Image: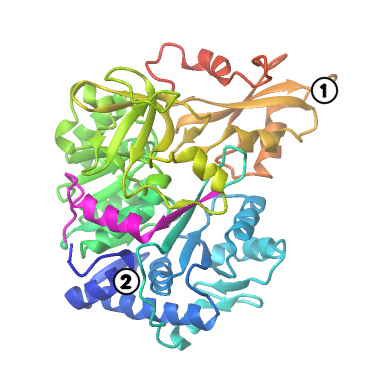
Amino acid sequence: MSDAIRILADIPAAQANAFGDKPAVEVEGRTLTYAELDRRADRVAGLLAAAGVKPGDRVSWLGRGSEAFFEIFFGAARARACLAPINSRLAPPEIAFILKDSGADLFFVTPDFFDVAQEVVSQVDRPIRLIGVGDSRPGIESYEALRDAAPAGPAHTPVHADDVLQLYTSGTTGLPKGVRLNNANYAAFLKLRTQVEGFDYGADDTVLIVMPLFHVAGTNISFAGLAAGGRVIVMPEFKPAEVLRTMQEERVAHIFLAPAMINMLLQQPEIASADFSALKTIAYGASPISEALLAEAKQRFGCGFIQFYGMTETTGAGSYLPPDAHEGELLRSCGKPWPTLEVTIMDDGGREVGPGEIGEIAIRGEIVMAGYWNRPEATAETVTPEGWLRTGDAGYRNEHGFFFVHDRVKDMIVSGGENVYPAEVENAILGCPGVADAAVIGVPDARWGEAVKAIVVRAPGADPRPEEIIAWARQRIAAYKAPKSVDFIDALPRNPSGKVLRRELRKPYWEGRDRMVG
């Protein structure tokens, strides 16, 4: 990585100087060179300044993967503003909440989401400018026209304390939380990733992005490719057959996949004759992976595998399992800490426990988030005064310093790499006619790792059908959060203080497994 890159905002200018008209980002046949990225980011910075965006302000994004995402991200970073992308899989009420919470007055949207954007903007009690990326219509201005007419960017000098990316995660209370990632976090990420075996991408490498750009894995792998001066290809949708074709035709060197994606690729008939000779690494994470799936993938793809364990709150970093450690019992491990980062196992009192003892995994280092946006109490609950971020995952380390995830301290479900908190699903279900009480758990699923299951107590005299409950939930929350199945029970098990005993509900579904995560 060039010494001219201190922070993310430096990437376009540094790489334009080094690589000029070399392709930087390609999306659906469109190519954005490093020189064009630099010029357009500067125009976006000017656009934002002309629109009254000040340092520290948020601007929002909703849409498919696009080269414009990077223009807007880097332009905002130059203007010392912060991009707050919204998960495009969310339901309109969830999108409206995030838009309100972020305080963004500029909302960039791709055409697929024009209708929902206009719907949610009408629910926000402040003026919001809708800017269409790739198209426009009454009430939605043209991004391209505004960008091309904008003056040069302001003479701001970004500093390490500037928030640069705000990604929203599911909340334990049912409300999403904005994770504030600043320039200091990403300066550490960019520096440390070059010291991680398998993650030191090169300028001649092609990196394929199939994770969404509202996900920390999607943004981080993109940033790593651009910081290296490589070619980044973004696929707006994960279509297994197209991914396999692109990997071969474009001679892809690096890709990040959630375990569910790996499984879907392995099920494609054409994989038997596929040519992966250019492939150097497959990085994986976002949810646990089975040893059998990992072994099959290693054999089929024939490249190095690297596991990343981390969270949005740790800039995606934490521990990693390098390619040469993928053998034996370590196939179940999430690896060792990134260089200079600290990872430990804590008991309930915050004390470190010894090898083999189960406790909560905690991470400390420069990659720990600046905090949750407008949530000081939630920040204090997650990050200790000593700087340890409590992950909510229960695990242990062996005598050689390798870490293993065993269970979750939190109630969070990870389905296909997406985090789902039971509270938000239960809130959606409890208003359904015929439902007296409900609890939501994660159960094993061969495709997604975990699937969302609702355990429902019927109201007296009522007989709601599972499909009615599922449909009710899907109208109120994202489809991936809605239950995939519903079981009925006479009464939910609770402790003396009335808290639902989810572990008791989960036990029958996880019987016989060595860990209670998918």
What residue is drawn where x is 57% and y is 60%? 102
Name the quadrant of the N terminus: bottom left
Residue to which mark 2 is pinned:
31
Residue 313 drawn at (x, y percent):
42, 46
In the depicted view, which residue is nearer to us: 5 or 21?
5
How many tags in the picture? 2
Q: CA distance from mark 1 to mark 2?
A: 57 Å
Query: Residue most toward the front?
Result: 385
Name the quadrant of the C terminus: top left
Residue 192 in view, yes or no: yes
For badge 1, the amino acid type reads Ala
Mark 2 residue element: strand
Q: Earlier in the sequence, mark 1 or mark 2?
A: 2
For badge 2, the amino acid type reads Thr
Mark 1 residue element: loop
What range is drawn magenta here? 177-202
Left of 492 or right of it: where is 83?
left
Q: Which mark is residue 315?
A: none
In the rendered structure, does residue 191 fall within the stretch colored magenta? yes
Above/below status of 80 relative to 444: below
Residue to which mark 1 is pinned:
462
Residue 159 drawn at (x, y percent):
36, 68
User: Pointer 1: residues within 10 angstroms few (<14), some, or many (20+)?
Assistant: few
User: Pointer 2: residues within 10 angstroms few (<14), some, or many (20+)?
Assistant: some
In the rendered structure, does residue 318 fall within the stretch colored magenta? no
Query: Residue most toward the right?
Result: 461
What residue is drawn where x is 39% and y is 58%? 182
Residue 44 drawn at (x, y percent):
43, 78
Residue 275 in view, yes or no: no
In the depicted view, which residue is nearer to us: 199 or 250?
199
In the depicted view, which residue is nearer to us: 1 or 284?
1
Left of 461 or right of it: where is 341?
left
